[in-house]
Amino acid sequence: MKTGIEYEDSLRKLNLQVFLFGKKVANVVDDPIIRPSMNAVKLTYELAEKPEYEDLMTVSSHLTGKKINRFTHIHQTTEDLVKKTKMERLLGAKSGCCFQRCVGMDALNALSITTYNIDKKYGSDYNRRFLRYLEYVQEEDLVCDGAMTDPKGDRSLPPHQQADPDLFLRVVEEREDGMVVRGAKAHQTGALNSHEIIVMPTISMGEKDKDYAVSFALPSDAQGITYIYGRQSCDTRKLEKGTIDRGNQCYGGHEALVVFDDVFVPWDRVFLFKEFEFAGELVENFASYHRQSYACKVGVGDVLIGASQVAAEYNGVHKVSHIKDKIIEMNHLNETLFCGSLACACEGSRQPSGTYLVNTLLANVCKQNVTRFPYEIARLAQDIAGGLMVTMPAEDDFNSPDVGHWLRKYYAASSSASVENRMRILRLIENITLGTAAVGYLTESMHGAGSPQAQRIMIARQVNMDEKKKTAKHLCGIVE
Ligand SMILES: Cc1cc2nc3c(=O)[nH]c(=O)nc-3n(C[C@H](O)[C@H](O)[C@H](O)COP(=O)(O)OP(=O)(O)OC[C@H]3O[C@@H](n4cnc5c(N)ncnc54)[C@H](O)[C@@H]3O)c2cc1C
């Protein structure tokens, strides 16, 4: 296993082609806009080094028996799935943002199931290839980007009918030693902090789309891959001299558009090649694991609830009944999210490959709640915080010899709090509900792992409606 420092050093050896604000980034690891997101991924290594988190953060590999980071593990029991949920909450709470490493873990687990199932049907070699790749990921303790979402163009059209055929990533050339792919993957979480990029199709596909039914893994700095960094609200505060206005001192998340400009993939890294009927299975299994992974938002919710309580105390309103009730409601919503992630883990089941998959109905219910509850928790946090959270002057004004004394005079609240601490806690609430971390806490809750409608379709498909009707008819004496 790598230490946090070794992880950081390993990123320095990558030769990533990254663009930010229209310019190529020379030093990705130390760029002040990008750096906080690296710090958050680094936490997944640092916590694994600590004895108190060993049980959650590490596990024995089912391939080699060696101790590995849980983010590279294939779940062997429902207990593994439960520990995954708890690990994600822990990391959400420690970072207060998206720590980016779950998406690769979810891709690895989904591929462990689907490669096995394809081989069963076709007698192919995908699962052996995949397990060899997995062993490499575990041995080197790598971060993988799970790249599913294509740009998708006109959403009403399947891949092969798009005006530009590259709007879904596809195979453009087949060679003896491998294939060449072209296209892009959008919104890629943690892409610049990843050693590997694991590509999967984004939707179920028919025969006419078989050139798009492809899954593979590449080193993140493979020839022909370009990253274009996604902006976040308030991101340039990270370039400012002070640290208070950032809200979160150390951590953040990031997404990027990843362009594949005729990139070569050797066959031993290809895990799905035109078996279009397995695209849907891979998407659904990945999505289910990833919908469980939104336990991370419970951890960020813990931070936001804590911050709201502190803000209430600083304002002197923490004993007021409606504030106490709002804090209870925030906790109720947050723990309900935790229940959903735990429930789909506890109800997981063994797949033919031996991998444990979450209960997919409950994983979809979990994620559907995630598309709503963080917004309500954020609304209540803003209610409790008061308007100062969005009208507060800059840190430089508080330090100004001309006006700083006015701000310290007029922004004083309860005697238990200094004005500076009041600023800090309000900036943290701003960061999570409106600033850089709101990307992860709110919009990612909405669209990450699929927009709300995607879960509703899965819920409708998976509930046993016949059984429900039968039960109702039986109770009221309907005999047909
Ligand atoms: C912060 C963040 C992080 C992310 N991280 C990753 C990642 O690491 N890896 C990854 O692969 N993806 C990632 N995603 C992508 C995520 O899975 C997609 O955002 C999601 O699947 C929705 O796709 P879209 O953004 O293209 O939305 P759109 O497809 O533009 O959807 C917008 C709306 O249109 C509706 N809609 C779209 N198509 C149809 C249709 N055919 N019929 C009916 N309604 C439709 C949707 O339901 C939604 O309401 C991330 C997204 C975000 C916001």
Image: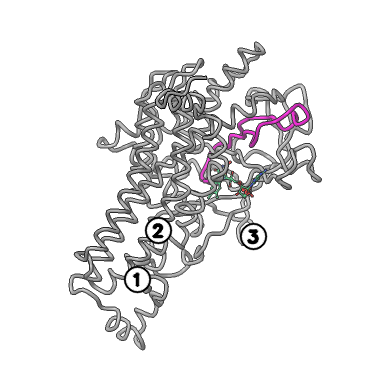
Amino acid type, mark 3? Lys
Q: Residue at x 78, y 43 (%)?
A: 162
The secondary element bearing badge 3 is classed as: strand
Magenta region, residue range: 189-218
* Image location of residue 73, percent across then percent down: 43, 27
Q: Is residue 142 left or right of residue 43?
A: right
Rounded to the nearest angstrom, the CA distance separating label 3 from label 1 is 39 Å
Q: Residue at x 69, y 41 (%)?
A: 260
Quarter of the image with the N terminus is top left
Is residue 84 covered in magenta?
Answer: no
Front residue (pair 371, 433): 371
Rounded to the nearest angstrom, the CA distance separating label 2 from label 1 is 12 Å
Q: Is residue 192 left or right of residue 277?
A: left
* Image location of residue 7, percent across then percent down: 44, 41
* Image location of residue 266, percent across then percent down: 68, 26
Q: Which residue is mark 2?
A: 378
Q: Which residue is mark 3?
A: 23
Q: Which residue is mark 1?
A: 386
Rounded to the nearest angstrom, the CA distance separating label 3 from label 2 is 34 Å
So how many labels did they put on this image? Answer: 3
User: Counting other residues with Cα less than 10 Å from the Cα at mark 3, is it few (<14), some (14-19), or many (20 or more)?
Assistant: few
* Image location of residue 329, percent across then percent down: 31, 53
Q: Looking at the image, is 474 positioned above or below residue 342?
A: above
Q: Residue 361: give its label.
A: none
Q: Looking at the image, is 391 positioned above or below residue 301?
A: below
User: Counting other residues with Cα less than 10 Å from the Cα at mark 2, is it few (<14), some (14-19), or many (20 or more)?
Assistant: many
Q: Earlier in the sequence, mark 2 or mark 1?
A: 2
Q: Residue at x 63, y 47 (%)?
A: 186
Choose mark 3 or mark 2, whichever is in front. Answer: 2
Amino acid type, mark 1? Gly
Amino acid type, mark 2? Ala
Q: Is mark 1 within 8 Å of ligand 1?
A: no
